[in-house]
Image (cartoon, rainbow, N blue to C red):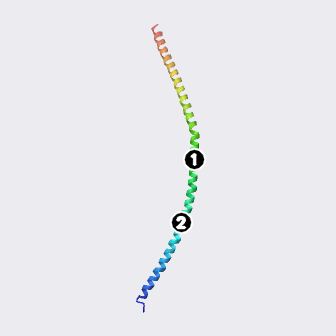
Amino acid sequence: MGSTMPTWWLTVSGIYFLLASIFMLGLVIIVIFLVRAIVQLSERVKVLSGKVEGLLDSAKKTSDAISPRIVSISKTAEGVSANIGKKVEIIASIGLALFAIKKFSKRHHDDH
Protein backbone atom coordinates (compact mmCIF):
# COMPACT_ATOMS: atom_id res chain seq x y z
CA MET A 1 0.00 0.00 0.00
CA GLY A 2 1.59 3.27 -1.14
CA SER A 3 1.35 6.76 0.28
CA THR A 4 -1.07 9.01 -1.56
CA MET A 5 0.06 12.21 0.17
CA PRO A 6 2.32 14.48 -1.78
CA THR A 7 5.81 15.07 -0.43
CA TRP A 8 5.38 18.86 -0.28
CA TRP A 9 2.38 18.37 2.05
CA LEU A 10 4.44 16.23 4.42
CA THR A 11 7.22 18.85 4.33
CA VAL A 12 4.82 21.74 5.08
CA SER A 13 3.17 19.74 7.86
CA GLY A 14 6.55 18.90 9.39
CA ILE A 15 7.67 22.56 9.28
CA TYR A 16 4.34 23.64 10.79
CA PHE A 17 4.67 21.02 13.56
CA LEU A 18 8.25 22.13 14.29
CA LEU A 19 7.30 25.86 14.40
CA ALA A 20 4.21 25.16 16.54
CA SER A 21 6.33 23.12 18.96
CA ILE A 22 8.90 25.95 19.22
CA PHE A 23 6.11 28.47 19.72
CA MET A 24 4.50 26.35 22.46
CA LEU A 25 7.87 25.89 24.20
CA GLY A 26 8.36 29.68 24.05
CA LEU A 27 4.92 30.22 25.57
CA VAL A 28 5.68 27.77 28.39
CA ILE A 29 8.95 29.60 29.14
CA ILE A 30 7.16 32.99 29.10
CA VAL A 31 4.47 31.67 31.46
CA ILE A 32 7.16 30.40 33.86
CA PHE A 33 8.84 33.83 33.88
CA LEU A 34 5.48 35.57 34.38
CA VAL A 35 4.59 33.30 37.31
CA ARG A 36 7.96 34.03 38.95
CA ALA A 37 7.49 37.77 38.41
CA ILE A 38 3.97 37.65 39.87
CA VAL A 39 5.24 35.76 42.93
CA GLN A 40 8.00 38.35 43.45
CA LEU A 41 5.53 41.21 43.00
CA SER A 42 3.15 39.57 45.42
CA GLU A 43 5.91 39.39 48.05
CA ARG A 44 6.80 43.04 47.44
CA VAL A 45 3.15 44.05 47.73
CA LYS A 46 2.91 42.22 51.07
CA VAL A 47 6.04 44.02 52.35
CA LEU A 48 4.79 47.41 51.14
CA SER A 49 1.36 46.73 52.59
CA GLY A 50 2.94 46.02 55.97
CA LYS A 51 4.94 49.24 55.75
CA VAL A 52 1.84 51.24 54.82
CA GLU A 53 -0.10 49.73 57.72
CA GLY A 54 2.79 50.68 60.02
CA LEU A 55 2.77 54.24 58.71
CA LEU A 56 -1.00 54.51 59.12
CA ASP A 57 -0.74 53.18 62.67
CA SER A 58 2.04 55.66 63.45
CA ALA A 59 0.01 58.52 61.95
CA LYS A 60 -3.02 57.51 64.02
CA LYS A 61 -0.95 57.39 67.20
CA THR A 62 0.54 60.80 66.40
CA SER A 63 -2.91 62.21 65.67
CA ASP A 64 -4.28 60.76 68.91
CA ALA A 65 -1.39 62.32 70.83
CA ILE A 66 -1.70 65.73 69.17
CA SER A 67 -5.50 66.09 69.27
CA PRO A 68 -5.75 66.90 73.01
CA ARG A 69 -2.96 69.46 72.63
CA ILE A 70 -4.75 71.14 69.74
CA VAL A 71 -7.96 71.29 71.77
CA SER A 72 -6.04 72.77 74.69
CA ILE A 73 -4.35 75.36 72.48
CA SER A 74 -7.69 76.20 70.90
CA LYS A 75 -9.32 76.73 74.30
CA THR A 76 -6.39 78.86 75.46
CA ALA A 77 -6.57 80.97 72.30
CA GLU A 78 -10.32 81.36 72.79
CA GLY A 79 -9.78 82.53 76.37
CA VAL A 80 -7.07 84.99 75.32
CA SER A 81 -9.32 86.29 72.55
CA ALA A 82 -12.19 86.78 75.00
CA ASN A 83 -9.89 88.64 77.44
CA ILE A 84 -8.57 90.88 74.68
CA GLY A 85 -12.14 91.54 73.56
CA LYS A 86 -13.12 92.60 77.08
CA LYS A 87 -10.08 94.88 77.34
CA VAL A 88 -10.85 96.45 73.98
CA GLU A 89 -14.43 97.09 75.15
CA ILE A 90 -13.13 98.74 78.33
CA ILE A 91 -10.62 100.87 76.40
CA ALA A 92 -13.29 101.86 73.88
CA SER A 93 -15.67 102.82 76.70
CA ILE A 94 -12.96 104.88 78.39
CA GLY A 95 -12.09 106.53 75.08
CA LEU A 96 -15.74 107.32 74.43
CA ALA A 97 -16.13 108.71 77.94
CA LEU A 98 -12.99 110.86 77.55
CA PHE A 99 -14.25 112.10 74.19
CA ALA A 100 -17.64 112.96 75.71
CA ILE A 101 -15.98 114.71 78.67
CA LYS A 102 -13.74 116.69 76.34
CA LYS A 103 -16.70 117.73 74.19
CA PHE A 104 -18.72 118.61 77.25
CA SER A 105 -15.88 120.61 78.82
CA LYS A 106 -15.20 122.39 75.51
CA ARG A 107 -18.89 123.41 75.25
CA HIS A 108 -18.98 124.34 78.89
CA HIS A 109 -15.76 126.33 78.51
CA ASP A 110 -17.03 128.07 75.32
CA ASP A 111 -20.26 129.06 77.12
CA HIS A 112 -18.33 131.02 79.78
State the separation of the CA atoms marked 2 and 1: 33 Å
Give left or right: position of 50 versus 112: right
Q: Number of labelled discs?
A: 2
For residue 81, above or below residue 5: above
Are dots 2 and 1 in contact, CB under 8 Å? no
Q: Looking at the rendering, in which quadrant would you find the N terminus?
A: bottom left
75 and 1: which is toward the camera = 1
Could you tell me residue 27's position as x and y percent? Answer: 50, 71
Residue matched to label 2: 35
Q: Where is residue 99 in the image (x, y as percent from the top left)?
A: 49, 17
Picture disc at residue 48 = none
Q: Residue at x 48, y 78 (%)?
A: 19
Q: What is the residue that sits farthest to the top in this orientation?
A: 112
Residue at the outermost left position: 4
Residue at image x 56%, y 36%?
Answer: 70
12 or 82: nearer the viewer: 12
Which residue is labeled 1 in the image?
57
Q: Which residue is drawn at 58% across and 52% down?
A: 51
State whether residue 1 is above or below residue 92: below
Looking at the rendered structure, the kind of residue marked 2 is Val
> In the visual, does 5 lie left or right of 74?
left
How many residues crowd mark 2 within 10 Å: few (<14), some (14–19), many (20+)?
few
Is 59 situated above or below 76?
Answer: below
Mark 2 or mark 1: which comes first in sequence?
A: 2
